[in-house]
Image: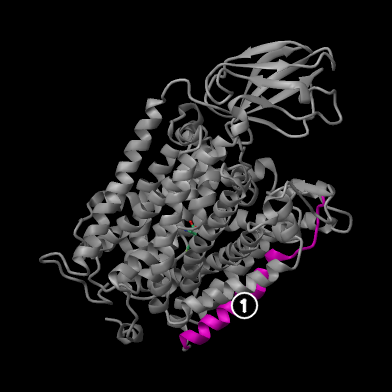
Amino acid sequence: MSAPDPLDAAPRQQWSRLGFVLAASGSAIGLGNIVFFPANAYRFGGGAFYVPYLVALLLVGIPLMIVELALGQQRRRAYPQALAAVSGRRGEWLGWWALANCAVVTLYYVTILAWAIGMAVAALGGLWRPEVATPGFDAATMPNPAGSFYRLVSGPWPLLFVALVWAANAWILRRGTASIERAVKVFVPAMWGLMVVLLLRGLTLPGGLDGALCLFTPDLAGMADPAVWQGAFSQIFFTLSVGFGVLTAYGSYLPRTSDTVNDALTVSLLNCGFEYLAGTAIFAILFAFSAVPQASTVAMMFFVVPHGIAQLPGGPVAVILFGVLFFVLLLMAGLSSSVSMIEGVVSALLDRFELSRRRAVLVVCAAGALAGSLFALPFIVDSGTASNGTLGLTLLDLVDHWAFSYGLLLVGLSQCLLVGWGHGAARLREGINASSSWRLGRWFDLLVRWVAPGIVAAILLSSLGQEVGGGLYGASYAESYAPGWAWLAALPVLVPLVWLALAVGLASRLARTSRPRRARLLLLVAALTGGPSVASELVLEAPGGPVAGREATVRWQSREGPPSVRLVAVHQPRSRVARRETLGSLAPGEGLRWVPSQAGLVTLVAEADGAPVTLPQPLDVSVRWARVPWSGVAVLAIAGAILFGGAAVALRRALRDGDRLPDGAGIQPPGST
Ligand code: PFF
């Protein structure tokens, strides 16, 4: 027997039952649900993404959530200490490494929230003007809301907002579970309410439901791309908050008798249910206004969705209302997530050092505000925004790539190996079953030892392969840096090195010291610049409007221009599964009949003499379903039933049974392993 651990004797704060459900689901529901999910789903092809996402939830997400919560609940300590209790020094080292990675993610996550404050203020007025002067950038004015965003990020305000968000986090964390519970009791119900309002608004727009069905209708050809699976698994990690050590910290404030399996099911199903609503609402809005999402999640959050909101019917009042609502929703969801990330770090420091909570919170938040300001640096490094525009955005983009695509997955993989193999999945499972009403079978061991680590390792290897084959992430930005900023070309190499050194150094050190309405009738496309004057005369006509059916005519109304252009429809433009469909040649004065091959967002491209004809603005259209896509309706219904039905059952049980033990179950004493 080893000497008793003083941590076992120390009193620990404890959640109320409802408080835990709200805090843990508030941690899971965040920017990842409202923005990253729709952006990733679009990038990976909508219908090609959702089924892999559900598979990822079942095979990896829920099992890892059970493991992380169980670690905290059984050991009643933060992540590094809980891992140390089950697998010694190596475990503690991994725990600190995970928290270092989590700290890095928190830094830029909070900066994004700071921008959301700036955009919420702009949404009261300036954001909706047709165009905004953006000093320092090549174009004197930019279309809104992109112009407003660039004006915001190239100014000093975000630095102040960063401090403000860190201060808000510190305030919420000041008394631990008691003060966190008080905040999430307001944030979480309000978030659900605002999301339902956004969903109803989206679905009642013309074409809204068609857009939602683009998310759920399975696209088997798209699923053949391994990158789609990779995207789905990364999304599940981030959205469920697994691979950060945070769930273990939250689990450590649960009584040992808490029903771990039910807790994990409640939190994951509530989170994915919220994500289902958010995806539906955002796809509906994008489709109704033919707003083509961009690969970048920041763009999605700050330009694309606001661009849709700007076109809402109901006049300026409706636009301002929904604009503010959207950013307030982001802020509440983001804050309830960021407090959990910070609590992950604070709880580990408290379990490691003799510190008062107040002091730990102050030190962590002050350091966070300082370091997080890096991502809000307003210097303009690329006036054309071909890379990221400002220094802060560039750093954020590069750091996010490494921390998100590699850090989380590495932690998840190592955790499976340490717990599944080192400690023993069966042993962990026995401990879990002792306090759970749904008992886990041997299949759980198989998932933790083989399936989850196997899939995560395969994803990591394939990402690394792409990195090696396709060049280091961000290397191509070097071409667009402004004079004086050429040295930034070194960042794609520096960032991963610093990230790795920081995380490894910190871990080892700490371990050692213990569309649009306009589309309803005629969709017209804007004028060409620089090339032959075609676009202003290019008109898309369809019976009942281009979004209303499968048949449309593209007409070139003018009698001037080049002898002919070739028209190409790009389906799912800017996504990984973009498909080109050549419509044929069109001469001035002629029309061309077009029967789109599939529903979804489409960009029409004109080419003359084989070269693309530059359009001043993209010709984006939404193609509605010709017939009801029953497979999409089925996925929508089945996923909805599983997520909400499951969440309702688990939630009821969680709130009804409280922390009562199932009959006859016993709890292993601490330190019995
Ligand atoms: N799950 C959160 C989101 O979807 O935005 C992000 C997050 C919160 C990640 C807490 C990690 C974490 F520990």
The spot of residue 401 in percent (x, y) is 62, 53
Q: Is residue 98 above or below residue 301?
A: below
**Quadrant where the image shows the N terminus:** bottom left
Residue drawn at (54%, 72%) of the image: 507
272 relative position to 536: left or right: left
Viewer-proximal residue among 252 and 611: 611
User: Is residue 298 magenta-colored?
Assistant: no
**Quadrant where the image shows the C terminus:** bottom left
Residue drawn at (48%, 76%) of the image: 172
Q: Amino acid at mark 1?
A: Ala
Does the image show residue 469?
yes
Taken as a whole, is the magenta stretch helix, strand or loop? helix
Q: Is residue 653 above or below residue 503?
A: above
The spot of residue 386 in percent (x, y) is 77, 46
What is the quadrant of residue 416 in the picture? bottom left
**Mark 1 burial class by Cα count in 10 Å: few <14, some 14-19, many 20+:** few
What is the quadrant of residue 587 in the picture? top right
The spot of residue 592 in percent (x, y) is 67, 12
Residue drawn at (54%, 46%) of the image: 461
Q: Which residues are magenta?
A: 356-383
Does the image show residue 87?
no
User: Is residue 367 magenta-colored?
Assistant: yes
What count of labels does the image hold? 1
